[in-house]
Amino acid sequence: MPEDTQNTRPINDTVATPKAIFGKDAVMEAMADHIAIMGLGPLIVDAKWDRKELTLTVAAGTVVNAAKAAKAAGYNFLEDVTAVDWYPTEPRFQISYSMLSHSFRQRLRVITRLNEGEQVASITGVWP
Amino acid sequence: MPTTLDDPKVAQEVHNPDTDIERNKAPHARDVTGATLHEFRTAESLLTANAPAPLPGTVIAEDMIVPGVEDVVLSHEIGHKPHGSDPVSDQTMILNMGPQHPSTHGVLRLVIELDGETIVSMSPDIGYLHTGIEKTCEAKFYAQVIPLTDRIDYLAPMTNNTAYCLAVEKLLELEVPERAQYLRVLFNELTRLQSHLVWLGTHALDIGALTVFLYCFREREELMRIFEAVSGQRMMTSYIRVGGVSLEPPAGLYDTIRKFLKKFPSRIDEYEGLLNNNPIWKSRLQGVGYLSGEDAVALGVTGPPLRASGVDFDVRRDMPYSGYEKFQFNVPTSKDGDVWARYVVRMIEMRESIKICLQALDGMPEGRIVAIAPKIILPDREQMKTGMESLIHHFKIVTEGYAVPAGEVTSSVESPHGMMNYYVVSDGTTKPLRVHMRNADFATLQALETMCKGKLVADVVAIIGSIDIVLGAIDR
């Protein structure tokens, strides 16, 4: 049966700053209480807060650990995995993982960069 | 040069103990699971970069239908015929379903492993409708991508347009006027009605209720006429544009929509009257295709199937876009998680959509239907023919497109089938560097095996119908 659930959920307001922030240190300082920053902490190589979206870069070897950390931090839903070809920039490829937290109503993008011929481990162990 | 076993690469491949273990496992012990389809597709899109072999654990449909060498040798030695052609054999049978099967709603191919009539395992084989749309988008100006998005999920063109335009507007940091937002909401909800009508009609047709199909298409025809009146096209509308919508609705259209919405609830009653107490419909749907809430979240299921499994999440309410926060509506959920629950959830959703449409019509504000951004939005025809500046802008937009600031964004909308995301990456030029669509159908397909395991072949048809699959959204 339908229930009136309109506007009954809490909204996480930790991400109120609208300004774009680039660079690992700047983002980690400005958004130190963000669940993703707290969860992924030492794995973050680079970060950006742009157009109200958080993108965290991790090293290719730590993708599985990053996925585990993100899941533990509350990002319970893997939306999508896709790739971007940045030719002729090096490293050429970018793998983007899009994760969503149902309870915090937040989206997180974790990216990693790969050179040609490199491989990245599967995260099927984290999201079955 | 032919590859031989002496080639160290091939030798490593053949004698890799990990893959050997995978190969020797019985097919039903391997699972198609959560991130697998996404990752496999990602690897495929990088074919230029020595794409790795399929991930361990991934079942390729072709592998299932070609018997393993050891199976053939074994069956020869002990006298069993492979693939269950011997009725007393304890071996399972491999059955190919589709891609031309009428109940697969397009060109979905399933390879099913059967024990008698019970499903042991299943592997979907997609790609028969692959159009390369994602790649094509990279060669178009931002505005030229919109007609392509119509063709992704061809039952919900307005929703696709909205998702793409939201992403580009986010990149441009463009504010859309309120009137355009209301028009978007109105036509998004009418699209939801239209898509759900096709779902209900074909789902009932699969189960054997022909009349419902005819009734549904009767109402769908009226919606098609509304879309034609507003955009000039019945299906491929391209009505929603970057910065707003393309045209002011013609005079009298709101009355037509109101008339339709007034009688539509009684039409839903009509469908429910045909189905709800029908013993065949009930026994084919109830208790079939169970999916638990945890499995649904883990496998990436969204939309009505997710809500039918008891997870209360709707993008329209929880992460509002295009002014949905101004509308009052309920999000139906069910704890049953079976095909029947998905049917009930969608039927209630249709009634909620009517409420949203009426609120949009009642609250429709006056004002512009596009944002003020002369270098991005095409000027009116009259302005273009009378003003020098407008003419220059028109010429520049049509011939060169408009540059979009560099960055990457994800837009998310609740399409009739579930959560639809557009991931657009810009490098600062007039053409997108990458456009990627996340369609609900693709992720929901991953859950098909979980829903079908242990059920009968006939249930597969009911379950495919209940996930409301559109192959255009899966093969991009």
Image (spheres, coloured by chain):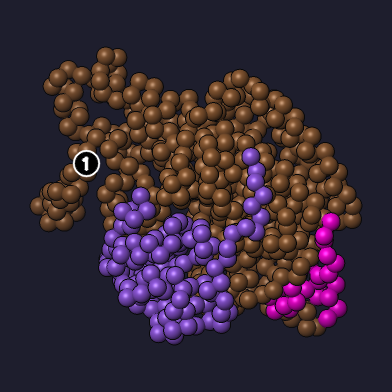
**Picture quadrant where residue B469 is located:** top right
Residue B169 location in percent, x, y?
A: 63, 71
Task: Please state, as top left, top right, bottom left or bottom right, where the N terminus of chain B lies in the image.
Answer: bottom left
Image colour for chain B is: brown
Residue B146: image location, x then y, percent: 63, 61
Residue B25 in the magenta stretch? The answer is no
Q: Does the image show residue B65? A: yes
| Residue bearing mark 1 | B23
Location of residue B63 in the rendering, given as x and y in whole percent from the top left corner: 30, 38
Magenta residues? Answer: B362-387
Compared across the picture, whether B459 is left or right of B279 comes to: left
Task: Write down the chain letter for disc 1.
Answer: B
Q: How many marks can you see? A: 1
In the image, farthest residue toward the left: B6
Residue under the point 51% across and 59% down: A103
Which is nearer the eye, B306 or B257? B306
